[in-house]
Image (cartoon, helix red, strand yellow):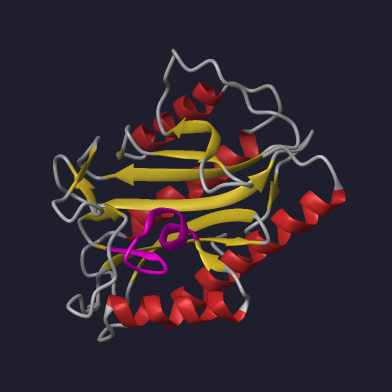
């Protein structure tokens, strides 16, 4: 969406703050020994306390309030009573929601407890690249230029990017134009970032894979060559100078 008045700014700011708070509290609540269903239920109660509707559940019929992915899963992991979170797990939580016709999206990956799999460097890289990417955005900049920036930073750190997952416009729906803010350069994409537009910037930084593949459950995404992927996501408002991070309350950085 493009923000054109105070009502729209207030609406997108409020829902962005809500999803950020829910993500922050879910991260703080997550611990070894609980199931992903228990963590999701906690997040669902928080969303309901704000009168916000889970975006994946409301828009797509997703079987959970939030997406919770573990270890080799990249995204869209289904919360389950059978999935017990363990010490050293890499976990990704993605929270998106709607309130009063406005939608916002954010996510984070982190290690539970001890870094038994040596993945903290991957997590840090994903977060740092996301922030560098956000700070580089200016009105008129090509979307493909941002993808080149993200991939070069990942390669410089010894990692790869998932090339078929992307950030996206957000605001009056969960997914809006520009639909494909990729983590790599797509020279065919001539779209440019617009002043006062709202977008969700996501990093998908990988140890081995370059493509996401869907499992038979119809939701969960994993890498085509295995390994691990860290994802981080903020909803931002593109301004004349430095973009405004609307989901800053999640304390990702």
Q: Position of residue 242 (x, y in %)?
A: 73, 40
Vertical side of 157 occupied by 230: above or below: below
207 in relation to 53, above or below: above
**Residue at position x 64%, y 33% in the image:** 137
The answer to whether residue 171 is left or right of residue 34 is: right
For the point 64% across and 23% down, the residue is: 141
Give the image quarter of residue 117. bottom left
**15 displayed left or right of 189:** right
Q: Quadrant of the N terminus?
A: top right
| Left or right, 142 with reference to 228 | right
Q: Residue sitting at 49 percent across and 33 percent down? A: 179
Would residue 49 be visible to someone looking at this image?
A: yes
Task: Please count the marks in the image.
Answer: 0
Q: Position of residue 17 (x, y in %)?
A: 66, 65
Magenta residues span: 55-69
Residue at the farthest right position: 6
Residue 28 visible here: no
Magenta-colored stretch includes residue 15: no
Residue at image point 52% right, 77% down: 25
Q: 28 or 84, which is in the foreground?
A: 84
């Amino acid at each position: 969406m493009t923000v054109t008045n105070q009502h729209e700014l207030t609406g997108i700011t409020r829902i962005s703050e809500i999803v950020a708070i829910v993500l922050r509290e879910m991260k703080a609540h997550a611990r070894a020994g609980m199931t992903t269903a228990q963590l999701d239920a906690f997040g669902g109660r928080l969303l309901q306390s704000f009168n916000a509707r889970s975006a994946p559940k409301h828009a797509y019929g997703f079987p959970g309030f939030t997406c919770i992915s573990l270890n080799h899963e990249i995204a869209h992991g289904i919360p389950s009573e059978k999935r017990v979170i363990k010490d050293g797990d890499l976990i990704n939580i993605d929270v998106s929601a709607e309130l009063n016709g406005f939608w916002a999206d954010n996510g984070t990956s982190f290690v539970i407890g001890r870094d038994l799999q040596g993945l903290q460097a991957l997590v840090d890289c994903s977060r740092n690249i996301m922030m560098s990417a956000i700070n580089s955005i200016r009105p008129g900049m090509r979307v493909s230029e941002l993808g080149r920036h993200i991939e070069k930073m990942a390669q410089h750190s010894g990692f790869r990017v998932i090339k078929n997952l992307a950030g996206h416009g957000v605001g009056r729906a969960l997914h809006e134009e520009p639909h494909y803010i990729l983590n790599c350069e797509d020279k065919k994409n001539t779209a440019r970032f617009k002043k006062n537009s709202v977008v969700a910037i996501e990093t998908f930084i990988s140890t081995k894979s370059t493509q996401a593949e869907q499992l038979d459950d119809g939701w969960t995404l994993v890498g085509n060559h295995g390994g691990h992927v860290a994802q981080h996501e903020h909803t931002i408002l593109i301004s004349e100078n430095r973009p405004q991070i609307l989901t800053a309350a999640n304390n990702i950085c």
